[in-house]
Amino acid sequence: MKTTKLIKRFLPYYKPYVGIMILDLFCASLTTVCELVLPMIVREITDRATNETVKLTVEFVLSIGALYLVLRLIDTAANYYMSTVGHIMGTKIETDMRRDMFEHLQRLSFSFYDNTKVGSIMSRISSDLFDVTEFAHHCPEEFFITGIKIVAAFIILCTINVPLTLIIFAVIPPMILVLRVFNRKMKTGFRESRKQVAELNSNVEDSLLGIRVVQSFANEEIENKKFAKGNNGFLKIKSKVYMYMGGFQSCTRFFDGLMYIVVVGALFIINKQINTADLMAYLLFVSTLLTSIRRIVEFAEQFQRGMTGIERFAEIVDRVPDIKDEAGAVDITDVKGKVEFKDVTFRYSEENEEVLNHINLSINKGENIALVGPSGGGKTTICSLIPRFYDIESGSISVDGVDVRNITLSSLRGNIGIVQQDVYLFSGSVYQNIEYGCPGVAPEQVYEAARLAGADEFIKNLPDGYDTYVGERGVKLSGGQKQRISIARVFLKNPPILILDEATSALDNESEYLVQKSLEKLAKGRTTLTIAHRLTTIKNADRIIVLTKEGIAEQGSHKELLENGGLYSQLYCSYTQI
């Protein structure tokens, strides 16, 4: 994105802090005025010392000293405000942007996360926005100060000597043109380095989350090589950035030297076009200008970092969610649980083959349906389409006769409970993880949900009971314990529609028995869809749907399908012989 477009994209974040920004710029103008007065004071003292010694009295020196002291006190107070409140404003803007990005990430659909590394997202929401704090505070401040100094210095110096002033300021335009070239290269370099950092973070996250697999296969050296490749890639990009930065700063120093007018000024003195006091004022004004330009130069790196951070922020928040509430979508209440698929066709992306092709399926209120069949038949896909994690290509899916696209997402998903094979527990206590099913409920309801899920007994035997810390992703608990906590979470939610996605396939026999008992309690009175590879667990289902890549191959009760001697019969016989 162009810099101007990025700045326009960023400006609305100043709106809540306009008062602070105005006062900050006012303080910046005060510090600038204080700085510009000093050369004039020196000029007056030098002029009196060389030309009118009589006027250089003690009273004059003391009055000038008092004036300078007052200016220093004003400068100190103004600078304190800029350094504290100004920086806090920058931090607040960064916080607002991080909030907006996180809230937007919550709305993005599964397809986004299917194609985006979490480590890359983490880099955008953390380190990329760190640089925005300095940018948000210093960008308007530094440019405002430099603008005042350039304009004020030009006007004041023109009152002294126009030709000499024009000579000095003639250096600024070519300086700006040259530095713009390096600025663009720096921006490109910082963007590349941010991308590389995000990729590096993703690799680190992937390796550390899978550390048990890494060590069990003794593949530490492979991970070290993968990290070294990414790390060296970052080094190359960063080195290129510093080469551009070196060129930027070297050119600045060259133009700095051109602006000093010692030789030219001496010629003006010889020709009596300027006196010594005026030359001293010129040198001090040039020094002041150069200080500002150097600050802008030093800020240039931060400016480009800030621009890169804003650009990467905009890339996320400007992304339109694939799945969102349609215009006129309504909340559904008193859901009975009838689900119907009519001529549904679906593929995950244009590059992929169709997973479902003209599927028709009707599930009655309170019916217990089991989905079985070879991998790739679309079992998990069907269960992902009901809560509208993905949108279908054609056809319709309805709940109680209402197309899911005409139901608000929060209302639709609030009436569906999902228990998955890969249980995700948040870093926190057992209690917090169960309460997540219905935040803010009374503790008694949490304990009752745990009891119904068959989890109450083992939870009470944990070191801190319900307050026991489960670790990252529930690492301190066994598979069966995590699964029962996830079931308790759904009990607390109490949804009319239940999806069980291979909820027991990763458990040992004892844990499977306990979890299966909990699931049977949970499914009672609800419309239930169960995906199962262990076919013995779904014998009591009201109806078993056999899915293949060609669609629904057969359906019926366990007994009916065995008697038919079709695909289900073959699968069941193969499974029971293992």
Image (cartoon, helix red, strand yellow):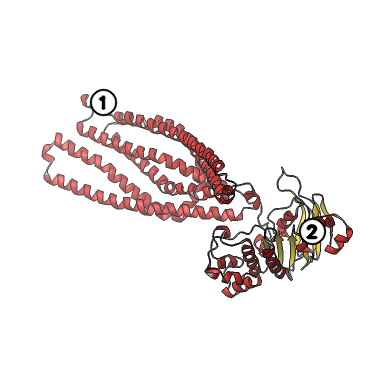
Q: Quadrant of the N terminus?
A: top right
Q: Is residue 280 above or below residue 271?
A: below
Q: Which residue is mark 1?
A: 263
Front-lying residue, 344 or 429 = 429
Q: Quadrant of the C terminus?
A: bottom right
Task: State the SS at label 1.
Answer: helix
- Which residue sits furthest left? 54
Task: State the SS at label 2.
Answer: helix
Front-lying residue, 323 or 418 = 418
Would you say residue 331 is visible in this rendering?
Answer: no
Residue 270 locus on image (x, y percent): 21, 24
Residue 382, quarter of picture: bottom right
Q: Residue at x 50, y 52 (%)?
A: 97
Front-lying residue, 19 or 316 = 316
Would you say residue 393 is visible in this rendering?
Answer: yes
Q: Which residue is mark 2?
A: 576
